Image (cartoon, rainbow, N blue to C red):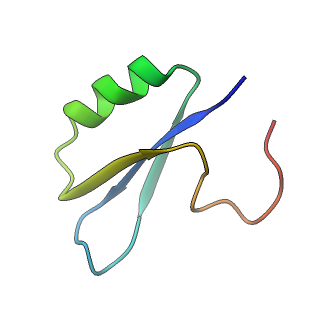
Amino acid sequence: MSKYYLCEADKADEGINKVTPYNDGETALLAANSSTAAVHFISTINPLADGEAED
């Protein structure tokens, strides 16, 4: 099963500061649509992970 990550940042030039995992793509999309962060996107890779594989 794939995970989806809502990635958010307060400013575009500061990088991602919050990542929220979701098991369902539709739920992730709904969360992204209601996000108030200046920058937000959905990814299938956690950009804040320390390089270890996630289950």
Q: Position of residue 27 (x, y in %)?
A: 41, 20
* In the image, residue 55 above or below residue 14: above
- Is 32 placed left or right of 55 in the picture? left
Determine the residue positioned at 21% across, 52% down. Answer: 37
Q: Position of residue 4 (x, y in %)?
A: 54, 35
Q: Position of residue 53 (x, y in %)?
A: 83, 51
Determine the residue positioned at 41% across, 65% down. Answer: 16
* Residue farthest along the bottom direction in this orientation: 13
Q: How many marks?
A: 0
Quadrant of the drawing holding the N terminus = top right
- Is 32 placed left or right of 20 in the picture? left
- Is 29 placed left or right of 51 in the picture? left
* In the image, residue 54 above or below residue 11: above
Q: Quadrant of residue 12?
A: bottom left
Determine the residue positioned at 24% across, 64% down. Answer: 10
- Is 12 placed left or right of 8 in the picture? left
Quadrant of the drawing holding the C terminus = top right
* In the image, residue 39 above or below residue 25: below
Q: Quadrant of residue 17?
A: bottom left
* In the image, residue 44 above or below residue 33: below
Determine the residue positioned at 67% across, 59% down. Answer: 49
